[in-house]
Image (cartoon, grey):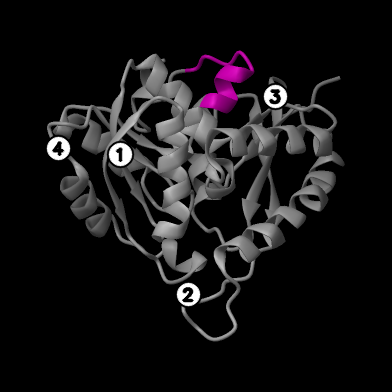
Amino acid sequence: MPDVLAWRKKFGVLAPSTNTIVEPDLHMMEVPGVTSHMGRIMMQNTVRHSANVPDNDQRAIKLGNEMQPTIERLLTMEPDYLVMAMSAPTFRGGLEGNLRWKAQMQEYSGGLGMANGAEACQRALNLLNVKRISVLTPYWSDTSDHVIQYFTESGFDVVANIDLESPSAVGIGHITSDKCQEALLKVNSDKAEAIIQCGTNLNMIRLADEADRWLGKPVLAINASIWWMALRDNGITDQLQGFGRMLRDY
């Protein structure tokens, strides 16, 4: 018997404990009969360059160790499908890194499907027949280098990128729409056929939809792309207005 609210699908969502943007974003994009339920991945809100802060590799290992217990907690509510609402780990190590990550998540979840940011963007770009892209992230280069590696290995030409270099994970959610708009204009060029925004704690789904129109090209916000993948993987074809062209048109 289906859940009375999730009579179509029930999604378990993995998000960093520091993230304040992705949960309300997903609720804004809800469709009838589909519910999303948050599992928090423990993540310290370390301030970059402060004393005794672990390096990027150490942080990635620690974060990876939190994935299995988070999934185990989500499995207790019997989800139909999982959603990875953190994008950086899905890009780490490029294309092969993403494949290894997906295999590990399948093992932890007992074979459940899981939407993830890297694959969602790749699918969307291929569907749009786009090859040359610009990338906007809230990260520093030691993280965004993995994003660029993933797209390059997936057959895309990254013609420009901008990192907003948030000093902390929580700080990403403090970046204003004005700053994001300024970055979009800087990273845009005639060479880029589309712009990709990474970082699920960056407030971008509404702005990306607007920018798509005034730049005249696809501007894909990571949260909307992940949600699009989750819905379409589950045969849910509802078209949503205000969250970008993938949820609206595809």
Residue 131 sits in quarter: top left
Which one is in front, 163 or 242?
Answer: 163
**Residue 182 image offset from top left, x and y in percent:** 19, 54
The CA distance from mark 1 to mark 2 is: 27 Å
Under circle 3, the secondary element is: strand
Q: Residues within 10 Å of mark 1 (few under 14, many from 20)?
A: many
Q: What residue is pinned by disc 2?
A: 48
Residue found at the far bottom of this picture: 51
Q: Is residue 139 visible?
A: no
**Residue 161 image offset from top left, x and y in percent:** 29, 47
Under circle 2, the secondary element is: loop
Residue 37 sits in quarter: top right
- Label 1 sits on what residue type? Ala
Determine whether label 3 and label 1 are within 8 Å by CB. Answer: no
Locate residue 149 relative to residue 4 in the image: left or right.
Answer: left
**Residue at horizontal 40 percent and vertical 61 percent from the top:** 140
**Residue at horizontal 62 percent and vertical 50 percent from the top:** 15
Residue found at the far left of this picture: 190
Determine whether label 1 and label 2 are within 8 Å by CB. Answer: no
Which one is in front, 159 or 105?
Answer: 159
Q: What residue is pinned by disc 4?
A: 189
Q: Say above or below: 2 vs 159.
A: above
Residue 145 is a magenta residue: no
Task: Point out the stretch of residues depicted in magenta.
Answer: 229-238
Q: Residue 208, which numbered label?
A: 1
The CA distance from mark 4 to mark 2 is: 31 Å
Q: Earlier in the sequence, mark 1 or mark 2?
A: 2
Q: Is residue 99 visible?
A: yes
Q: On the rendered image, what quadrant is the N terminus found in?
A: top right
- Label 3 sits on what residue type? Lys
